[in-house]
Amino acid sequence: MNAGPGRAAWIILCSLLIAYALTVVPLPDWATGARPQWVALVLIYWCLAVPHRVGVGVAWLAGLAQDALQSTLLGQHAFSYAIAAFLVLKLHQRIRVYPLGQQSIIVLILLTMIHLAQLWVNGLVGRPPPPAAYWLAPLVGTLMWPWIFIIMRAVRRRYAIA
């Protein structure tokens, strides 16, 4: 029995809220550059798992919320998340059949692309380039992907989101 559209939407929204909470958890100064892109990881999962429910529009709105949460340029995360969601939606049938190791490589490419898009937007507005630790986040996110996938799949199966 599948979860109703309202129940599925609440589960997806709750998972995004948890990702936002993890985004603002304080970290020591030496670890801030290695913070995974939690919202991007959750969006990638939902775009893979239920592409008919989570798409470019949801990614855009999630990015706008991320911009407001982190006080970044409005639309910066929205732009990069929408591009990533579009790519995942176009390739979701291929990506879903890959083992977790190969999916992690694709997630690395997507997270790096998100970082590059944000770097490009920052360059357009004249902000200086970030330190080298900026590039740790996609690597840490890639290492987190198998765990995110397993946990989110268990949640999706538990609540029968299809």
Image (tube, rainbow, N blue to C red):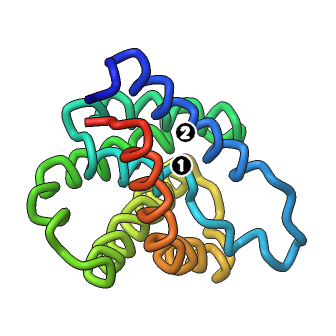
Tell me: 22 left or right of 108: right
Tell me: 52 left or right of 33: left
Q: Residues within 10 Å of mark 1 (few under 14, many from 20)?
A: many
Asked if residue 66 is positioned above or below residue 120 in the image, the reply reads above
Mark 1 near mark 2, Cβ–Cβ under 8 Å? yes
Tell me: 46 left or right of 30: left
Q: Position of residue 49 (x, y in %)?
A: 27, 48
Q: Position of residue 115 (x, y in %)?
A: 47, 63
**Disc assigned to residue 39:** 1
Q: Name the element at disc 2.
A: helix
| Residue 98, quarter of picture | bottom left
Tell me: 46 left or right of 126: left
Which residue is painted at 44% across and 54% down in the image?
Answer: 154
Which residue is painted at 46% across and 76% down in the image?
Answer: 142
C-alpha distance separating marks 1 and 2? 6 Å
Q: Amino acid at mark 2?
A: Leu
Q: Position of residue 122 (x, y in %)?
A: 55, 53
Image quadrant holding the N terminus, namely: top left
**Which residue lies under the disc numbered 2?**
16
In the rendered structure, which disc, 1 or 2, sits on the residue that comes first in sequence?
Answer: 2
Which residue is painted at 69% across and 51% down in the image?
Answer: 23
Q: Residues within 10 Å of mark 2 (few under 14, many from 20)?
A: many
Q: Marks 1 and 2: which is nearer the front?
A: 2
Which residue is painted at 34% across and 65% down in the image?
Answer: 110
Q: Name the element at disc 1.
A: helix
Nearer-the-camera pick, 4 or 45: 4
Asked if residue 151 is positioned above or below residue 129 in the image, the reply reads above
Image quadrant holding the C terminus, namely: top left
Q: Amino acid at mark 1?
A: Val
